[in-house]
């Protein structure tokens, strides 16, 4: 007997068997729907540019700290580690501290770190950067970044090497150890 069935039975002992079955089926549909949505949002394949390809250029407005636009061309010469996120994404909130810790450690001088928010507004991006205490520049996607970089899941981590090629891509929760390994290789 499932917990949902027992709970429904305890709440209303006069409920008919058909009504109990409908309640259990309804709960099962909700669980399956939530699992499918979660899987779609956090899937780990086919998001990001192909590894080995030339990274698409971009120029995006910096929202935290506020400054002039940042372009990929201006960052060439050092590896660029990008975290693509959204303020509404719970997995992004969980993943954000790994990049922040790497940035604050001795790894930062060896690479450029940037966050790209795919939020719809400047205010949402600023709030996430502030609330999550992101210490590196956060840029606001204008829609072209997501299309050019084929962002389909969040968060997506991308490492661009010194030559401007995409060397690594990962989506979903990505460990600090894995990101550090990428940077040490580059």
Image (cartoon, rainbow, N blue to C red):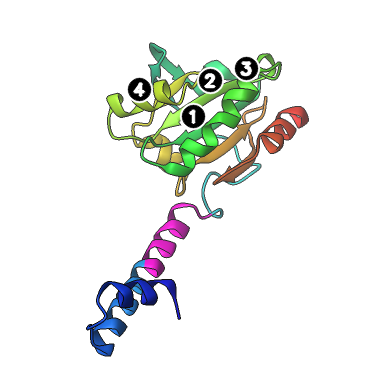
Mark 4: give few (<14), some (14-19) or many (20+) Cα within 10 Å.
Answer: many
Helix, strand or loop for disc 3: helix
Image location (x, y in percent) of residue 131: 40, 24
Between 29 and 10, the one lying in front of the other is 10
User: Is the residue under label 3 in contact with that under label 2 (CB below 8 Å)?
Assistant: no
User: Alpha-carbon distance for marks 4 and 2?
Assistant: 24 Å
Spot the residue most to the right.
185
Q: Is residue 69 left or right of residue 57?
A: left
Residue 96 seen: yes
Residue located at (38% from left, 72% from top): 4
Residue indicated by mark 3:
104
Magenta stretch holds residue 39? yes
Helix, strand or loop for disc 2: helix
Image location (x, y in percent) of residue 22: 27, 81
Of the image marks 1 and 2, the number of the one nearer the N terminus: 1
Q: On residue 126, which mark appears? A: 4
Indicate the quadrant containing the C terminus: top left, top right, bottom left or bottom right.
top right
The answer to whether residue 91 is above or below residue 179 is below
User: Alpha-carbon distance for marks 3 and 1?
Assistant: 26 Å
Q: Which residues are magenta?
A: 31-43
Image location (x, y in percent) of residue 115: 48, 27
Residue indicated by mark 1:
57
Image location (x, y in percent) of residue 50: 59, 46
User: Alpha-carbon distance for marks 4 and 1?
Assistant: 23 Å
Residue indicated by mark 2:
73
Q: Is residue 181 left or right of residue 131?
A: right
């Amino acid at each position: 007997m499932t917990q949902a069935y027992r709970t429904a039975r305890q709440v209303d002992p006069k409920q008919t068997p058909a009504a109990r079955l409908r309640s259990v089926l309804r709960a099962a549909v909700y669980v399956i729907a939530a699992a499918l949505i979660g899987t779609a949002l956090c899937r780990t394949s086919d998001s990001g540019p192909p590894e080995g390809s030339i990274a698409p250029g971009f120029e995006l407005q910096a929202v935290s700290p506020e400054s002039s636009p940042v372009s990929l061309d201006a960052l060439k010469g050092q590896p660029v580690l990008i975290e693509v996120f959204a303020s509404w994404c719970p997995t992004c909130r969980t993943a954000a501290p790994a990049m922040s810790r790497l940035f604050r450690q001795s790894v930062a001088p060896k690479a450029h770190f940037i966050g790209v928010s795919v939020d719809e507004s400047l205010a949402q991006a600023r709030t996430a950067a502030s609330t999550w205490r992101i210490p590196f520049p956060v840029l606001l996607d204008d829609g072209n970044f997501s299309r050019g970089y084929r962002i389909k899941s969040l968060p997506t981590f991308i490492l661009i090497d010194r030559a401007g090629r995409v060397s690594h891509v990962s989506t979903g929760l990505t460990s600090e150890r894995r990101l550090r390994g990428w940077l040490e290789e580059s």
